[in-house]
Every structure is written in C-alpha cells, then in structure tokens.
Amino acid sequence: MTDKDNIILDVKDLKLHFPIYEGVFKRVVGHVKAVDGVSFQLRDGEVLGLVGESGCGKTTVGRTILRLYDPTSGEIWYQKPTGERVNLADINQRQMKPLRRELRMIFQDPFSSLNPRLTVKDLISEPLEIHGIAKGKEAERRVAELMSAVGLNPSLMRRYPHEFSGGQRQRIGLARTLSLNPRLVVADEPVSALDVSVQAQVLNLLQELQQRLGLTLIFIAHDLSVVEHISDRIAVMYVGKIVEMADTSALLEKPLHPYTEVLLSAVPPADPDVKHERIQLQGEVPSPANPPSGCIFHPRCKYAQAVCSQQVPPLTEVQSGHFAACHFAKELHLKGIQAGATA
C-alpha cells in the first residue's frame, strides 16, 4: 500500500467565512474568517492533534470536515473503505447521511450533547436504529457491549444522563460515537470539561479504544500536554490558519514557528525544580473579521521584520514532514521542550 492509498482524509484550502450583517436590510458588510485556507492530510489509523487557543478555529475545522457547517470553499476528500474518494464539501446532506456511520464526533460538553429525556440505552441505541443496524433486543445487547467497552456497568443503561458524573457522561458520549463502528472520529476537546483527576482516565480510555479499533482521530484541544499524550502529529492553529504541523516529538523539541514556541513556553514542566520561563505575548489576538496583512502573527511576534507585514508566508515543508508558515523558519532557533516532559 502506498502513502497515497493510506490517506483517509485530504483537506485542501478549506475556508469557512461567516457573513457579518448590518442595518435594517441585513446587508453583508464583511466576513468572519473562522477557517481561512486550512490544508492537511490524515493517514488511516493516525491521531492528529489540532491545538490552539480559544477562538482560533480548531473546533470549526472539525465541524466543517463532518459537514455540521457548510464550507465556503475548499475540498474535503475522504477515502471510503472501498477505495473510492468523495469530496465531502461537494455533496448535500442527503448524500452525507450514509457517510455519518463512518464519520463521527465526540462533543466537548458531555451534558449538553446528551438528551436529558432519554435513558442511556436510548441515547446509545438511537444511531443504531436511525441507520437500520439494530433494534429491540439486538440493540440492547449492542448497548451493553458498548457500555462495557467504555468502562460502564451495563446494568445502568436505564438511567438518565443527570444520574452520572461528568466522566461517566463523557463515556456515554464515547459509547454513542462508537456505536456505528466509525473509521474517522473528531474529538472536540473531549476532556476539557472534566476534572483533572478524571481527564487522564477518559484520555487513556480513548487512546486504548483508538488503538484497539484502529480509529483515525482528529483530537482537538488547547492543552498541549494533553495533545502530546495521544497524538502522532500535531497541527498548531492561529486565527483560522495552520501555522505549523509536524510529528509530535519534532514539534515539541524543535518548533519552527514563533507562535508554537509561545505555546510550548506556557506548558509547565513535570519537575517543579526545573526553571521555567514563560514567553509573554504583547497585544491582543487579531479579529478574524479584520485580520492583519501579511503573516497573521506578525503584530505579536518578536522576530517580525518588514516582509512579515507585507507577504503571507505559505505553509511549506521546511524539514521532512515538518511544515511551518514563517518567512524565517529556517533561520530562527526556537526553544522547545522534551517530549514527555510535560506535567
């Protein structure tokens, strides 16, 4: 099998611009560029961590890939198990429905994503019935299997979401996601709403299931220490764009983009005796409705020069498998951290 055959998802220049309306007649006076030219490839069975601060567009990327949002432009090529490739950006919701068995999402808030009026059995079995896979006793048997797989006692299936803890609710959401045996899962900050003591449990469970079931995973988070734990590669986003992407160890140990260096400086070391110097950024995050010219990061970058405000740096392969959108990626010597050294 060639590398090309192994690519399950190929996103090309994906954009999602939300219109800004003004006045009585709701004229469009501008656009919020939530996702602005995102491109990446995902191999079958790989975990890609998508990281960035709140509002950078990472969740919007995940939802647009699954067509919960309709993209403004770009291509989302998905390779089916048969080998056929389909552009998800080009099909309607009716054509998308059968693909939702293979493309699933884990939502951030385990409480708001579960219908409080349905029992756990109904919540997990609902996708099975909608897609005509199982119903009745067969669906109940499948629910019991899924609950056991995510570490929940099947005898609790007739209870309601409010009767469970946050960690247990996230496991219910995970069981619901896995009910259709998906190939590609977008996990939208699945542990950020949980207590720290529970985060590790859910993260380890997700990693175990990913490896056992051979899932391809896009793991969205703002915590680099969490992303490091589960990801094969990491993509860093800033104001709607991917600014760096590389294998996890390469990105942590030798970042090539100044924004990645800033993010890494915010990660506390596991050893409290290690001296830690955090980089303090000046200024505010630019508005995606009115982004600066040139490099999106240049107003806050201490390495910026004249060219940075004039030309947009493309995301280019600076080293083998290591991409960065910086005019000086080959010249800068940025400070990273050792993989596995985070708290």
Image (cartoon, rainbow, N blue to C red):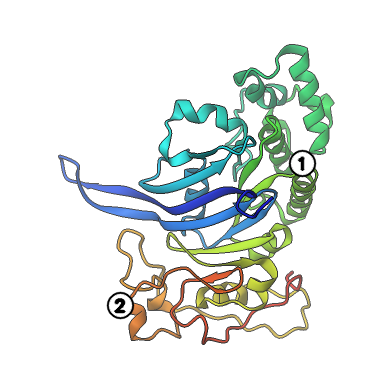
Q: Are circles 2 and 1 on residues that touch, CB within 8 Å?
A: no
Left of 91 or right of it: where is 162? right
Quarter of the figure with the C terminus: bottom right
Residue 321 marker: none
- Foreground: 293 or 10? 10
Q: What residue type is labelled 1?
A: Leu
Q: Where is residue 88 in the image (x, y as percent from the top left)?
A: 47, 39
Q: Which amino acid does label 2 sit on?
A: Gln
Q: How crowded is mark 1: few (under 14 residues within 10 Å), some or many (20 or more)?
A: some
- x 84%, y 31%: residue: 153
- In the image shown, does 94 or 188 lie closer to the viewer? 94
Q: Which residue is drawn at 77% across and 44% down?
A: 209
Q: Which residue is drawn at 57% across and 62% down?
A: 235
Residue 267 visible to the viewer: no
Q: Mark 1 falls on what kind of element?
A: helix
The quadrant where residue 165 appears: top right
At 46% from the left and 55% from the top, the residue drawn is 57
Cα separation, mark 2 vs mark 1, equals 47 Å
Q: Which of 103 and 76 is in front in this view?
A: 76
* Residue 71 visible in this rendered orientation of the protein: yes
Residue at image mark 1: 213
Residue 24 x/y as whole percent: 15, 40
In the visual, does 227 lie left or right of 239? right
Instruction: Label 2: state its secondary structure.
Output: loop
Q: Which residue lies furthest to the front in this view?
A: 1
Identify the residue position indicated by label 2 in the image: 310
Query: Residue 288 is drawn in which quadrant?
Result: bottom left
